[in-house]
Image (cartoon, grey):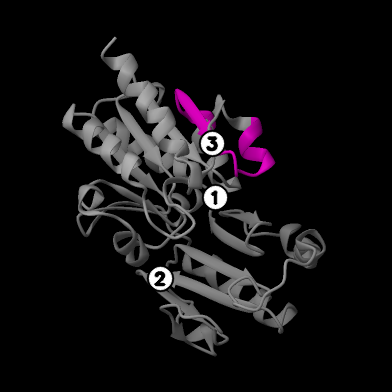
Amino acid sequence: MYQVLALDLDDTLLCSDGGIDAATLRLLTQWRATGRQIVIATGRPPRSVGAALPPLLQDVPWICYNGAVVRREGRTIFADLMEPADVLELVEWGCRELPDWRVGLEIDDVLYLNQRLTIAKEYVYQPDLHAVAHQPAAKVLYSNGALNADAGHGDAYAMFAALDPLLARLPGRTRPMLSYRYRLAQFMSNTADKAVALAHVVAEWGYTMDQVAAFGDDVNDVDMLLACGLGVAMANAVEEVHAAADHVTTSNNEGGVAKVLADLLAAAHA
């Protein structure tokens, strides 16, 4: 029987309106009442995780930044950050070669951006990122419209072709994560991953990854779904996630997590 749920947030646990439907919340409450565990596994920074979660999920581990940091009740229990030299190299390349793009840094739960946003979002405007790029960072981000409210869909594949020269010479201790859905390029430590962070959390509880049921929808969930005993893709997931999953449930707006969770709880009582 599975002992741990690993849940992505956006487009997985959360409905499109940012909430969790009542049926899912009821089943999550039942799951915890049996003594089983829940882990949140998201690309979000810690500052935006808590605001999205109900009281039931405030004290569970939060895997943030796609695995670069794990927080529990405000305390960092695991971190895999980029080295300052690599942070500086990526910042310099982006600012030099992509002057029209937005470049950002996630450091100590603060987002620094070299261009202003047209949407409401918590960040620090830092036109000269060199002033902060000498520190370990969870992420370096490149965006060509992804964070703008007026951004069109465009051709993300053509957009990311501009990164080919960088990808060919990427610092060896870093890795890229290209999200075509959000038109966002993220760079992290080459060992930072939701699956790695999840394995760390699960081991502390005395469980193995075979005892985890993981749910996701985007490319940053693929390794996690492959590593767990049960990998569940949402119906609204990208093709890569469907290919990696053991099971496909309904969408995040159709109670997809609840449907699988009900089956898992029923099996536990059979």
Per the image, the residue denoted by label 2 is: 107
- Foreground of the two, 59 or 153: 153
Q: Residue furthest bottom?
A: 127
Q: Give the side of residue 95 with respect to residue 125, left or right.
A: right
Identify which residue is drawn at 73% across, 66% down: 153
Marks 1/3: CA distance?
32 Å
Residue 239 on the magenta segment: yes
Residues under labels 1 and 2: Cα distance?
A: 17 Å
Dot 1: what SS? loop
Q: Which residues are drawn in magenta?
A: 226-243
Disc 1 marks which amino acid? Answer: Asn
Q: Which residue is mark 3?
A: 250
Residues at marks 1 and 3 touching, judged by CB atoms closer than 8 Å: no
Secondary structure type for disc 3: loop
Disc 3 marks a residue whose amino acid type is Thr
Label 1 sits on residue? 190
Q: Nearer the viewer, mark 1 or mark 2?
A: 2
